[in-house]
């Protein structure tokens, strides 16, 4: 990850910079006022992100409440100097008409933030993200490891939980209706599920 | 890490097995009763572990209390099936008498466990280790990235904290007298001290 500009930017200046035509298609984040280039995601990453977004949209539709963001939507996690993270998937616990979705980066925290790990990510770089999300007030942070097929669940003030393929992800007090087996994250449509999971679903 | 074919073992059986002559010089851990071989750590990994141990030993001598272990000393973090982890560096908050230090795996609980990230570490492997230390009752876990020169601070009832080179590393409420700069963990003899 290379730092691009030398002067410190605010979240708003970063948004304007990212919208310039010459920056179209670039993946960047703002970390403590500095623009940092992100490597383009690998193929399983995009599949997993959109699949998790789908599963969360299903939850939002079922409970009639909630909004999902994907595609590294910006979340302002620190101010002065500003840090804008592109989050893989977020769940906002709100009812909001389409027209009222803010055009700028989110300053309200989601209840759930999901990051899908790539082997090229340093584990501590992932911890940095998790610590920033929790400090921002995000209730639950999942880090999904597509290689070992696990999900680590982080909450502020709680020891992290490492869930394996047969464990169940829950929403705790933040999203009580949320119940997704870890195996569901890695079971795409038309592929075989275990019988126990079918009856549970 | 390859799983070595062997029947399920207890931590005590594992200790005896590891110390068989044919296993000399190899690194193993016991995970849920199964023996797992570890890759030998790198030059950088060993250097950082040694340097942190030095900083912690200095701290222990200054306060006349504390004991440091290195070299993947065994810690039994789970029973039935047993899991024995080799921890990079541990700090025991006790006045230890040399002759009373366990000749087998420690029965004491370290107040600080430190892992230095290796190239073979995946997020899951690392998170499993951290969870096992915290669940076992270790109140403070540092995960050090020697490439990014950062420290992730894990505690069972506090928010995860991330420190970079310019930050101060403290012992939190676990070792309240301990403080150093994160940069100090990567500063070798003959190199100038980080600016205060």
Image (cartoon, coloured by chain):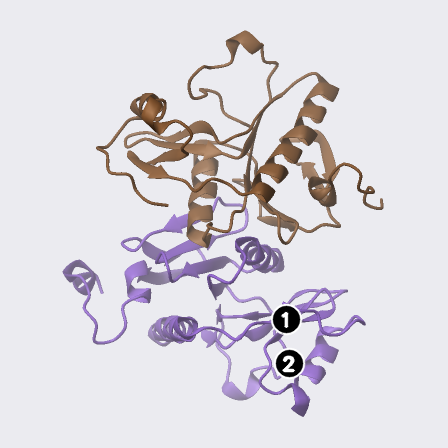
Chain colours: A purple, B brown
Q: Which residue shows up at 71% across the image and 25% down it?
A: B58
Q: Which residue is mark 2?
A: A104
Residue B88 in view of the camera: yes
Instruction: Indicate the quadrant containing the C terminus of chain A: top left, top right, bottom left or bottom right.
Output: bottom left
Badge 2 marks a residue whose secondary structure is loop
Q: Which residue shows up at 30% across the image and 55% down it?
A: A165
Marks 2/1: CA distance? 9 Å
Q: Is residue A17 above or below residue A191?
A: below
Q: Residues within 10 Å of mark 1 (few under 14, many from 20)?
A: some
Which residue is most to the right? B196
Q: Which residue is mark 1?
A: A107
Residue B46 position by quadrant: top right
Q: Is residue B136 above or below residue A169?
A: above
Chain letter of the residue carrying label 2 = A
Q: Which residue shows up at 48% across the image and 21% down it?
A: B108
Q: Are dots 2 and 1 in contact, CB under 8 Å?
A: yes
Residue B112, position as x, y percentages in the image = 57, 32
Badge 1 marks a residue whose secondary structure is loop
Which residue is most to the left? A195
């Amino acid at each position: 990850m290379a730092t691009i500009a030398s002067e410190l930017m605010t979240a708003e200046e970063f948004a304007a910079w990212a919208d310039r035509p010459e920056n179209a298609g670039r993946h960047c984040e703002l970390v403590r006022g500095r623009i940092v280039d992100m490597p383009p995601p690998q193929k399983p990453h995009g599949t997993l992100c959109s699949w998790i977004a789908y599963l969360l949209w299903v939850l939002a539709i079922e409970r009639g409440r909630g909004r999902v963001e994907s595609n590294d939507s910006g979340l302002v996690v620190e101010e002065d100097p500003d840090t804008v993270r592109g989050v893989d998937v977020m769940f906002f616990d709100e009812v909001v008409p389409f027209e009222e979705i803010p055009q700028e980066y989110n300053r309200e925290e989601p209840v759930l933030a999901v990051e899908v790990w790539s082997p090229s990510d340093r584990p501590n770089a992932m911890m940095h993200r998790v610590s920033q999300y929790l400090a921002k007030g995000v209730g639950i942070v999942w880090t999904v490891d597509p290689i070992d097929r696990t999900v680590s669940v982080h909450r502020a003030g709680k020891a992290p939980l490492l869930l394996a393929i047969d464990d169940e992800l829950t929403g705790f007090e933040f999203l009580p209706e949320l119940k997704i087996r870890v195996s569901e994250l890695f079971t795409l449509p038309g592929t075989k599920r275990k019988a126990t999971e079918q009856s549970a679903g | 890490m390859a799983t070595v074919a062997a029947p399920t073992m207890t931590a005590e059986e594992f200790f005896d097995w590891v110390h068989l002559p044919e296993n000399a010089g190899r690194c193993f851990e016991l995970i849920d009763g199964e023996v797992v071989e570890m890759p030998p750590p790198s030059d950088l990994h060993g250097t950082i572990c040694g340097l942190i141990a030095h900083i912690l030993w200095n701290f222990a001598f200054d306060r006349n209390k504390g004991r440091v272990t290195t070299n993947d000393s065994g810690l039994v973090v789970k029973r039935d099936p047993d899991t024995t982890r080799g921890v990079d560096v541990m700090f025991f908050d006790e006045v230890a008498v040399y002759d009373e230090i366990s000749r087998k795996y420690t029965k004491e609980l370290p107040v600080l466990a430190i892992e230095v990230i290796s190239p073979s570490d995946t997020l899951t492997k690392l998170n499993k280790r951290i969870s096992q230390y915290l669940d076992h009752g270790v109140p403070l876990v540092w995960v050090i990235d020697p490439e990014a020169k950062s420290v992730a601070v894990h505690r069972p009832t506090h928010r995860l904290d991330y420190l970079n080179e310019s930050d101060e590393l403290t012992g939190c409420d676990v070792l309240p007298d301990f403080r150093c700069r994160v940069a100090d963990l990567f500063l070798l003899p003959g190199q100038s001290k980080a600016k205060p």
